[in-house]
Amino acid sequence: MVRLLLRCALALPVFALAAETQPLDTFSPYAGRGYPTQVYFGDTHHHTSNSGDAFMNGDRLTPDQAYRFARGEEVVSSTGVPVRLSRPMDFLVISDHAEGLGVITEVYNGNPLFMQDATLQRWSKAMKQGGKAAADAVNELVSAQAQGTLPSVIQDPATVGPVMKSVWQSYTSTAESFNEPGRFTAMIGYEWTSVPGGNNLHRNVLFRDGKDRADQMLPFSAWQSEDPEALWAWMAKYEESTGGSLLAIPHNGNLSNGRMFEVETFDGQPITADYAQRRQRWEPLQEMMQTKGSSETHPTLSPNDEFADFGIAGWEYGNLTLEDSLETPEMRHTMYLRDGLQRGLEQERALGTNPFKFGFIGGTDVHNSLTSIEEDNFMGKHVIHEPRPERWEHVSKEGFGKTRYTWHYTAAGYAAVWAVENTREGLWDAMRRKEVYATSGSRITVRFFAGWDFDAQDAMARDVAAAGYAGGVPMGGDLKGSERGDSAAPSFLVSALKDPMFGNLDRIQVVKGWLDDSGQAQEKVYDVVWADADERTIGKDGKLSPVGNTVDVRRATWTDSIGEPGLSTVWTDPDFDPSEPAFYYARVIEIPTPTWMAYDQLRYGIKMSKDVPMVHQERAWTSPVWYTP
């Protein structure tokens, strides 16, 4: 029935019946639209050979090749594999590490300035050997940065400054040459890689600007300070000095060992209202999904959420280096995004400002210059993860990862941006207002609006966005109180269409978090519309019956005989209390499809262990909407 209604809705005309009396200056229903009508898919977290750890692991592809690949050209990977995307991307942010930008290449080349140091001599030799020796060197690099024991010569501004400046200016020139407004956006950015004690506090810094402004200041690195407040101060100085604009996107928090949403400053002081205002100003988004898994929530935090375990296998072992204390359940309250949003509500009540009022965005964190993250086209995170029969196995055989397996890495994820145009300014502005969402790797199209007067007909409109913007606020927005002054509950207009190359849709859910009368954080997941509604119901346990599973693991195939190509509805919160602050976001779930491990198992004629997942359900997460009494 839902499929039939959707098809009928898509066929509904939007012109007036009395067309013969319509003035010519109002003839076109599309003229004068000021809201975004197109979603753009890209990657905000991408590393090339300019990143030290990527180069040490064998990445030899430059930003030039990364851009060519992203816009749809065929390239050859660092391991000699011809590779091409199924569809071009709309934009790419190359976010190479600011720490020693391009310096490791000079170490590899045997630059005499660096060969004075015995450790760097050994790393240079190891990189040329490749394999386990190179991976061991990467481990040393990551651990040394986490512990503050890097060779002093590669942190000496007098030595590395000229190298980094040359590499940065070459990169921004390449970005200018590939930036084609309206067709493909090469947004300038870099990664600030704070990793105190191995805890992941990394941020990607994105410029609204072009080369003329971006070149005026060398990127601020974690070698200068690992404190996020120092990064924000540099960002403020950049904007004041250049007239440009910056924002920062913290990485997925599931490797921070509880430090991503802690309610203390970097040096252990209670956060203040000023801190909260600055964090909200500089960090409007948070990375939901990437190759290191999902950061939405964890089963120990959300025991009633049947989809809480997605993309976390292997990543709950501990932080980046696994040399510090391992992750504990207590840490997760200040690691995962859903609980981070709840901490934000609590802090807003205490401070008057919400420090964790962020939208959701996806990224990949690939370190091989290739954003190839579809399950049947996954080139891995590092060069050592590129296709070969044994890549799924324990990578400690090569000295990297210690207790993590390559199959723990996910083929993910996309940044989806509702922008008025595919330009640096258009995309950046949409990110700043949080009108963005994350996907686990497919290109699902999702709209999400909150208002007070949506009705069922709005969900059946040919253009749900027209009703959404007219009667409410989009994802990332703030829902003001009802003008009626009554206790009416808000309504939510949500619509999703499948990626034509991925599976049908299973369901759309709305996730709600709020503070109850006692100030305690609560959460609930609501199934609001689902496929095959005539056959599926919500049981006494509050759970919707499963959509089914058509995956043939042996052949790594599935059929779209279940699910729907599109789902749309208006849902009203049945548990609304106008006195309780809350946030809401939509989660769209696809039907089961094969993982990249299933495709590898078929291609290489191998048999993986039983703990390797062969089937999963791709998904999308919209940025939240907040309600404040």
Image: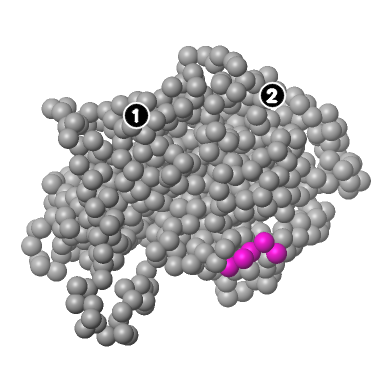
Q: How far across and down, in percent of the image, does residue 175 sit? A: 67, 61
Q: Nearer the viewer, residue 242 or 442?
A: 442
Residue depicted at 27% across the width and 50% down the height: 7
Q: Is 194 part of what is drawn in magenta?
A: no
Secondary structure of residue under mark 1:
loop
Q: Which residue is mark 1?
A: 299
Q: Quadrant of residue 520?
A: top left
| Colour pattern | one colour
Residue depicted at 59% across the width and 15% down the height: 606
Image: magenta residue range: 177-181
Q: Callout 2 environment at 10 Å: few (<14), some (14 to 19), or many (20+)?
A: some
Main SS class of the magenta portion in the image = loop
Q: Nearer the viewer, residue 490 or 165?
A: 490
Q: Nearer the viewer, residue 313 or 163?
A: 313
Quadrant in which the C terminus appears = bottom left
Q: Callout 1 environment at 10 Å: few (<14), some (14 to 19), or many (20+)?
A: some
Residue depicted at 71% across the width and 50% down the height: 65
Is residue 17 positioned above or below 515 on the image? below
Q: How far across and down, in percent of the image, does residue 230 sit? A: 57, 57
Viewer can see residue 499: yes
Q: Earlier in the sequence, mark 1 or mark 2?
A: 1
Distance from the alpha carbon under mark 1 to that under mark 2: 30 Å
Q: How far across and down, in percent of the image, does residue 402 sit? A: 61, 23
Q: Which residue is mark 2?
A: 399
Q: Amino acid at mark 2?
A: Gly
Q: Residue furthest left?
A: 486
Q: Residue furthest right?
A: 112
Q: Relative to 153, is 17 on the left or the right?
A: left
Q: Amino acid at mark 1?
A: Pro
Viewer can see residue 439: no
Q: Relative to 218, is 24 on the left or the right?
A: left
Q: Relative to 530, is 68 on the left or the right?
A: right
